[in-house]
Image (cartoon, rainbow, N blue to C red):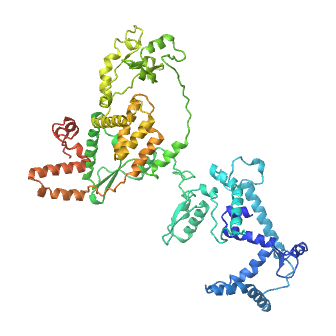
């Protein structure tokens, strides 16, 4: 039993049972002969079949007297008194038994064992039959091995064990043996490696109880405890309430499910059930009545709560061309609500918190595994690939639609060429062709001033060519391709990448690295260390590396910036830079009032004060950034076009 004591975290039994066994093993040699003669039981009274085992006799004599009146209960806590009491308690037990016999409080003429009387035997037989019926009818019979499932189950509830709980239970005996060995060798060995009274570490055994969700309960003392609620126990307590409280009836108790969680909303393991939002909305609508007009109420004591995503989806996006238009419509809609309340709360889906209503949905989706089969098409060089069932004419026509740079470039770059797939036109969408890239496809002028224009493989392609079937070649789209690619990055970002390129060129020149525009991994690593020594901030280094990532992706190169060592170096830069906590406070409504009240004291004129008052109020209520309302100078057309202008503002009268 020792392994079971240790794995079940029964610390008292685990600590003292080995001592008891060692005492039994060290008994005198004559004890074995007495045991063989039948001196292994204790009789407290005269009669046959009245012997009990020594442990039971100790419980009924010494321990009973010790814990009764005049025993340890009420005794002083002084150590010396407790020691004297422990040394003499067996003598006190004998004196107490003799006094009870002398006072005729104990009868000694009983010739029968209490458990051998007819009433006791009839009671025991009934208990045995009830146990058999309960096991065979209400439980999984543990003795019927042939009908047991392969997976471990709870014989009482029939609940299947999860994988981790099954693994823990099947290895419990081995875990108990290991913990027993550690305890005996450390606490009971002769070298005294550990103290006998040191706390015994818990085994970490997982049982079926761990499959039920724990519920937090708050006691009257204010202490919060966690525990498993037994549905049967909850039902019994609820029935008891019906007898002592007038507001709780049996009908009320039976109207609720007998479980610790509502099964209509949650599964047995505590996860939420999936249902349609509209079903819940209809149920809520049935609980309230509709009124044509809102009755008078206190605006300061009213809060309007709305579904933010539902509100955004209700906007007419066809009338909006930019996100700014969407923001204006949203702000106007929010402002119109302040006629009825002083506080408006728009609730959106949250994914930045660990425990949210979306966590159950994410867990459910991640637990669902799907398998999809993909057909991989391989090719090398300029070999064409036609899907099964396609004629060779279609594949031959698709050959002329493969794109490549105009100029073949030098031989050095051509030797490092890679192959990229280019999808054909919709007429032959399943045909995939490959063509070698003989020059970096860097399409951003600010980076390398290398704008790649495209043409077909056969400029003189015949009338069967799909690329020329409508009389238009790729040469007609060169300017459009250049324009779209150069405008895919903001001007400020392009300038940042240009600075990164210039610094990288200087770095390569200083240490003598070759100018390979498929930037090797060791060059990127060395460049990060170089920028760190120059004192660059983490955000600057990260932005510069993002330029290399864009370059690699545009040229179908392997993106070394996403390698593990690169990301870890960037993390190291971030951690090594000492950061100071931002002590700036957010602008509140009260702080805005204070700022507006002192503008007349610091501005040169009343007109200037009104301008600042207008821009501060607009930035606060419109959630604008400074760069969206101001420009550096009027000659900077790019900055002026991105700022808020008078023509962008429309004033509406709210009725």
260 sits to left or right of 168: left
Where does residue 211 sit, x and y in percent of width and height? 60, 54
The residue closer to the viewer here, 140 or 465, is: 465
Where does residue 359 sit, x and y in percent of width and height? 48, 48
Q: Is residue 316 visible?
A: no
In the rendered image, the vertical position of residue 429 relative to residue 221, given as above or below: above
Quarter of the image with the N terminus in it = bottom right
Where does residue 644 sit, x and y in percent of width and height? 20, 41
The residue closer to the viewer here, 331 or 501, is: 501
Q: Residue at x 27, y 59 (%)?
A: 300
Q: Residue at x 77, y 59 (%)?
A: 132
Q: Is residue 455 visible?
A: yes
Q: Residue at x 38, y 37 (%)?
A: 511
Q: Residue at x 42, y 14 (%)?
A: 400
**Residue 372: quadrant of the picture:** top right
The residue closer to the viewer here, 151 or 196, is: 196
The extreme top residue here reads 462
The extreme left residue here reads 605
């Amino acid at each position: 039993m020792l392994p079971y004591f240790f794995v079940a975290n029964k610390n008292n039994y685990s600590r003292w049972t080995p001592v008891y066994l060692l005492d039994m093993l060290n008994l005198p040699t004559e004890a074995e002969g007495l045991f063989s003669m039948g001196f292994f039981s204790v009789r407290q009274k005269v009669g046959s079949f009245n012997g009990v085992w020594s442990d039971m006799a100790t419980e009924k004599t010494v321990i009973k007297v010790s814990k009764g009146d005049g025993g340890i209960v009420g005794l002083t806590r002084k150590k010396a008194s407790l020691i004297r009491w422990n040394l003499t308690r067996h003598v006190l037990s004998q004196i107490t038994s003799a006094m009870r016999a002398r006072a005729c409080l104990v009868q000694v003429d009983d010739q029968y064992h209490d458990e051998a009387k007819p009433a006791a035997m009839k009671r025991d037989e009934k208990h045995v039959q009830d146990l058999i019926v309960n096991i065979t009818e209400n439980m999984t019979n543990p003795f019927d091995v042939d009908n047991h499932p392969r997976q471990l189950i709870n014989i009482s509830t029939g609940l299947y064990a999860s994988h981790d709980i099954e693994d823990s239970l099947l290895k419990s005996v081995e875990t108990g043996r290991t913990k027993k060995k550690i305890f005996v060798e450390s606490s009971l060995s002769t070298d005294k490696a550990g103290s006998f009274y040191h706390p015994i570490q818990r085994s970490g055994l997982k049982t079926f109880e761990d499959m039920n969700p724990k519920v937090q309960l708050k006691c009257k003392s204010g202490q919060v405890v966690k525990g498993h609620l037994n549905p049967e126990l909850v039902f019994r307590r609820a029935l008891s309430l019906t007898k002592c409280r007038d507001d709780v009836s049996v009908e009320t108790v039976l109207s609720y499910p007998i479980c610790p969680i509502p099964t209509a909303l949650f599964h047995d393991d505590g996860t939420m059930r999936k249902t349609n939002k509209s079903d819940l909305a209809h149920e809520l609508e049935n609980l309230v009545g509709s009124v044509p007009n809102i009755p008078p109420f206190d605006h300061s004591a009213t809060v309007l709560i709305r579904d933010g995503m539902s509100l955004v989806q209700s906007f007419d996006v066809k009338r909006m061309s930019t996100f700014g238009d969407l923001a204006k419509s949203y702000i106007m809609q929010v402002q119109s609500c302040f006629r009825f309340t002083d506080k408006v709360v728009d609730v959106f889906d949250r994914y930045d918190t660990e425990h949210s209503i979306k966590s159950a949905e994410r867990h459910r989706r991640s637990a669902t595994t799907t398998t999809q089969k993909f057909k991989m098409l391989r090719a090398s060089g300029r070999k064409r690939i036609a899907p099964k069932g396609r004629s060779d004419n279609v594949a031959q026509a698709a050959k002329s639609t493969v794109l490549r740079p105009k100029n073949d470039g030098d031989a050095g770059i051509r030797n490092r060429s890679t192959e990229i797939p280019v999808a054909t036109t919709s007429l032959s969408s399943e045909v995939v062709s490959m063509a070698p890239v003989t020059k970096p496809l860097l399409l951003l002028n600010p980076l390398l001033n290398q704008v790649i224009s495209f043409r077909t493989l056969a400029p003189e392609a015949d009338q069967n060519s799909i690329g020329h079937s409508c009389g238009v070649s790729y040469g007609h789209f060169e300017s459009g391709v250049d324009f779209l690619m150069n405008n895919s990055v903001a001007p400020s970002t392009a300038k940042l990448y240009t600075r990164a390129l210039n610094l990288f060129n200087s770095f390569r020149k200083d240490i003598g690295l070759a100018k390979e525009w498929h930037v090797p991994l060791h060059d990127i690593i060395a460049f990060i260390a170089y920028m760190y020594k120059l004192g660059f901030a983490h955000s600057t280094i990260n932005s510069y590396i993002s330029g290399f990532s864009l370059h690699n992706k545009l040229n179908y190169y392997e993106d070394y910036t996403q390698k593990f060592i690169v990301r870890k170096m960037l993390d190291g830069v971030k951690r090594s830079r000492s950061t100071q906590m931002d002590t700036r406070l957010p602008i509140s409504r009260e702080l805005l009032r204070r700022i507006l009240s002192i503008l007349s004291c610091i501005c040169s004129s009343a007109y200037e004060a009104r301008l600042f008052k207008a821009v501060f109020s607009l930035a606060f209520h419109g959630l604008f950034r400074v760069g969206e309302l101001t420009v550096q100078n009027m000659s900077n057309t790019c900055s002026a076009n991105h700022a808020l202008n008078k023509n962008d503002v429309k004033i509406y009268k709210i009725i």
